[in-house]
Structure formats: C-alpha cells, structure tokens
Image: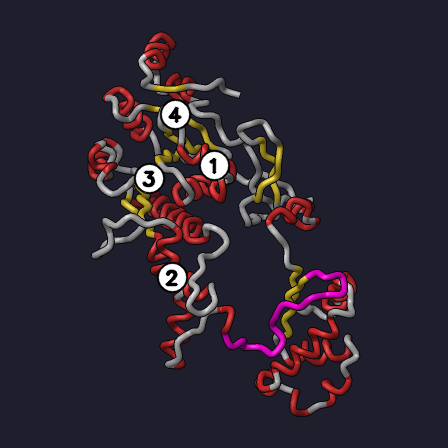
C-alpha cells in the first residue's frame, strides 16, 4: 500500500474567507498539502453546511484538514480579530461578492500595508473586463463559456455532472498562489491574484476553439461529435451493464480482431487504417453492439486488458466507495462527517515520491478552533469568554 503522508506546505498559514466550492476547494488543496488553513466563518457557520440536494456534500468534501474560527465580521472586534489573524498569515483566499471585501477593509491594498508578504487570492466569476462585476456560479460559467453547449445534445445545453469549473478555478488559484510563494522567497513581497470561473471554463473549451481555428468547422456537441476513431463508444454487455471501449491505433485494431476472432475484419485491407475504418464506423459499431451483448462484462474486460485497449465500465459516484483500486492505494480517505457518520471521500489525486495526502483532521465544527486560535494570538481566557458572551466569536468544543 502507498504511504499517505505528504506535507510540503508545512509552515504556510492560509486564511480562508470563502464558501460554496471554488474558495473551499482552493483551501482544501493547500490543507491537504500540509498548510495550516484557518477558515473564518460567520457566527452561525458557513451556509454551505446546511445545503441539501446536490449541495449536500459540498462542506464535507471541501473542508477537511482545516481549522474553524467563527467571527462576527460586522462587529469592530470581530473584524480586528480577522485582521490580526491575516497579519500573521502567508495567504488569504476570498470569494466574497464584488465590493463586500472592500467595505470590510479586508482588501489587498489595506491588508498588504501591515503584511507586505501576503499572497492574496481573490476568486470571482470573471476576471478584469466588462463582466467583472457580474455574479457567476459554476453553472453560469458553463453556459457562457461553451461547456454546456458541448456537453448536451444539440439545442439542449447541459452542465457537466460535477462542479468542474469551481474546482478547476480553485486549482488554478492554487497554481498562482504557489508561484507567488516561490517568487516571494526572492522578493519578500506578496501578490494580488485573481482566479475567474468564466475564464477557467473558456480555457477548458480552448481545444474546441483551436479545432475551429485549425479546420474552419465548428465543433459539434459531444453527443453528436464525429469521433476521431471508429471504435470509441459505449456498449451493452451480456449482463446488461454498459462499458466504454476505445480502439485508437491500428495495432490495437489488429490485436482486437485477433482476440475477438474477427478474422474477416483482420484480413480486410479496406479496414487496415483508422481513417478507412471511420468511413465504415456505423457498420462496425452495429456488429460490435451485437457481439458484446453475448459477452459478460468480466470476460470483455479480461479480453480488452490482454492487449492494452482503453475501456471503462460505466460507474455511478456511489459505486466508487468500493472501487478496489481507490481502496488499495490511498485514493479514498476515511472522514468523519459533522454528524459523526464515518465515510470515505476522494484524496487529492497526486502522488509525491509514492506518497499520497492524508487526513489530518475531519471537517471542523463551527468555531471548533476559535479559542485555540485566539490563545495563540495572545488573548487571555477572560477576554475570550467576554467575546463569546458578546457573540463576537462562536465556539464548539475542540476535538
């Protein structure tokens, strides 16, 4: 089993003033890599904690390995505490609505006066330009940025089945933060960073823009795209399961024909190259559709594995809890949810020298670390109790 203990960002303190997915996913990546991430929440907690439906998993997925302090930022005392924490930190992540952060005096220009080495990552719907003050969500970015058009059938734009733009926007934010931290080693100065949802989505569909530039033909939505390969589709097996199969080289085609006893295809010079096979794609897919319905999923996987063909059983998210590969190599991390339920959630998808990030702490209770953080800032116990009584801070027992 792969060891799970990498902490290259040990010694870096991050303050996270964010909610939903984009900001918290940025903090998650930093925390999983060893940074101390302090999440500043409202007194009643991050609203994401109480989402239902498709948002019910947001908080549990994106807030492990963090500390929580809950503050009333509308109070002068709460705001001063936040500023004190930030003054002793390396990175700030925020995704407040445009203008809010300035009204609180938590903008980069103000905070960098007392902390010139601060890396300030502001995550918004849009970067600088005519749209910059507009509100955006993952779905808005996918609709505007062409991804929904490419995902759904013609005339039926469809968002991707996960918050891919939020998470990728957060990931690009981390890339910029790490670059700024590296530069700070030389200059001693921080940086103001912006990451945008819209621009993230446009970057992801850049391949389709490039296709248009190269060919002059607009990319068609994925459900009706013209595949680059003759066998690149989803098939049904004898046990009524579905599996994706791709045959993407001429050598794979020859091995495929041999393994599945398709000797007539193997000998047909009109099917020797991929471009020739594309012309007969409909005929090939019809025959394979009938053939694969006579073969069990296991047998089909064994046959495809024997010569290195790309394939993928179609799984649902809930199937992944028991995936043998994920459970064998640290791909899933055991986590206790806020209600005490134990589960497994995806680890950061990287290895460094054969090591994976691991769980250091469960998603925090609201204000779970408030008292400890204030103690570290030099507050006395009676001062802290007074702040609790005044509801400037909230706290939950530290576990």
Of callouts 1 and 2, the N-terminal one: 1
**The N terminus - image quarter:** top right
Reading the image, the residue beneath label 2 is: 203
Nearer-N-terminus badge (1/4): 4
Judging depth in this view, the residue of 218 and 101 nearest the camera is: 218
Residue 173 sits inside the magenta stretch: no
Say if the magenta span includes residue 239. yes
Residue at 27 percent of width and 53 percent of height? 127
From which residue to which does the magenta span run?
A: 225-241
Q: With 265 as the anchor, is 382 left or right in this view?
A: left
Quick one: SS at disc 2? helix
Q: Look at the numbered disc 3 and give the secondary structure of its residue.
A: strand
Q: Separation of disc 2 and disc 3 at Cα?
A: 22 Å
Q: Is residue 184 left or right of residue 318?
A: left
Helix, strand or loop under label 4: loop
Q: Residue at x 28, y 28 (%)?
A: 83
| Residue to which mark 4 is pinned | 44
Distance from label 3 to label 4 (Cα)? 18 Å
Assess disc 2: are there few (<14), some (14-19) or many (≥20) residues with their C-alpha within 10 Å of its C-alpha: few
Q: Dot 4: within a 10 Å radius of its alpha carbon, few (fewer than 14), some, or many (20 or more) residues? A: some
Closer to the N terminus: mark 3 or mark 4?
A: 4
Q: Are marks 4 and 2 in contact (CB under 8 Å)?
A: no
Count residues near mark 3 (Cα–Cα under 10 Å), then give few for <14, some for 14-19, many for 20+: many
Asked whether the residues under the numbered discs 3 and 1 touch, taking CB atoms below 8 Å apart as contact, a structural biologist would say no
Q: Mark 3 sits on what residue? A: 94
Q: Is residue 233 left or right of residue 208?
A: right
């Amino acid at each position: 089993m792969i060891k799970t203990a990498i902490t290259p960002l040990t010694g870096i303190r991050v303050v996270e003033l964010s909610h939903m997915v984009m900001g918290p996913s940025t903090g998650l990546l930093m925390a999983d890599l060893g940074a101390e991430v302090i999440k500043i929440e409202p007194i009643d907690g991050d609203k994401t904690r109480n989402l239902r439906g498709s948002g019910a998993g947001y908080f549990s997925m994106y807030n492990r390995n963090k500390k929580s302090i809950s503050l009333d930022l509308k109070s002068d005392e709460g705001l001063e505490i936040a500023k004190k924490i930030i003054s002793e930190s390396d990175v700030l992540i925020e995704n407040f609505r445009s203008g809010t952060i300035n009204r609180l005096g938590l903008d980069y220009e103000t905070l960098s006066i007392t902390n010139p080495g601060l890396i300030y990552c502001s995550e918004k719907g849009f970067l600088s330009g005519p749209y910059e003050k507009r509100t955006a969500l993952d779905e808005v970015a996918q609709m505007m940025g062409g991804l929904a058009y490419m995902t759904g059938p013609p005339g039926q734009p469809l968002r991707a089945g996960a918050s891919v733009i939020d998470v990728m926007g957060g990931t690009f934010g981390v890339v910029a933060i790490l670059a700024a931290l590296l530069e700070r080693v030389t200059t001693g100065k921080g940086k103001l960073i912006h990451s945008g949802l819209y621009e993230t989505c446009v970057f992801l569909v850049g391949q389709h823009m490039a296709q248009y530039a190269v060919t002059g033909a607009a990319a068609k939505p994925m459900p009706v795209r013209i595949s680059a390969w003759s066998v690149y589709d989803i098939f049904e097996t004898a046990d009524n399961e579905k599996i994706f199969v791709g045959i993407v080289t001429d050598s794979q085609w020859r091995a495929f024909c041999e393994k599945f006893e398709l000797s007539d295809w193997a000998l047909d010079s009109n099917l020797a190259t991929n471009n020739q096979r594309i012309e007969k794609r409909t005929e090939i897919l019809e025959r394979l559709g009938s053939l694969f319905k006579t073969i069990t999923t296991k047998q089909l996987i064994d046959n495809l594995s024997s010569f290195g063909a790309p394939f993928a059983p179609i799984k649902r998210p809930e199937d992944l809890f028991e995936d043998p590969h994920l459970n064998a190599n640290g791909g899933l991390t055991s986590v206790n949810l806020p209600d005490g339920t134990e589960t497994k959630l995806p680890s950061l998808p990287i290895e460094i020298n054969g090591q994976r990030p691991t769980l250091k702490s469960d998603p925090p209770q609201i204000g779970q670390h408030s008292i400890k953080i204030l103690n570290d800032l030099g507050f006395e116990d009676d001062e802290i109790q007074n702040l609790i009584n005044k509801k400037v801070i909230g706290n939950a027992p530290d576990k």
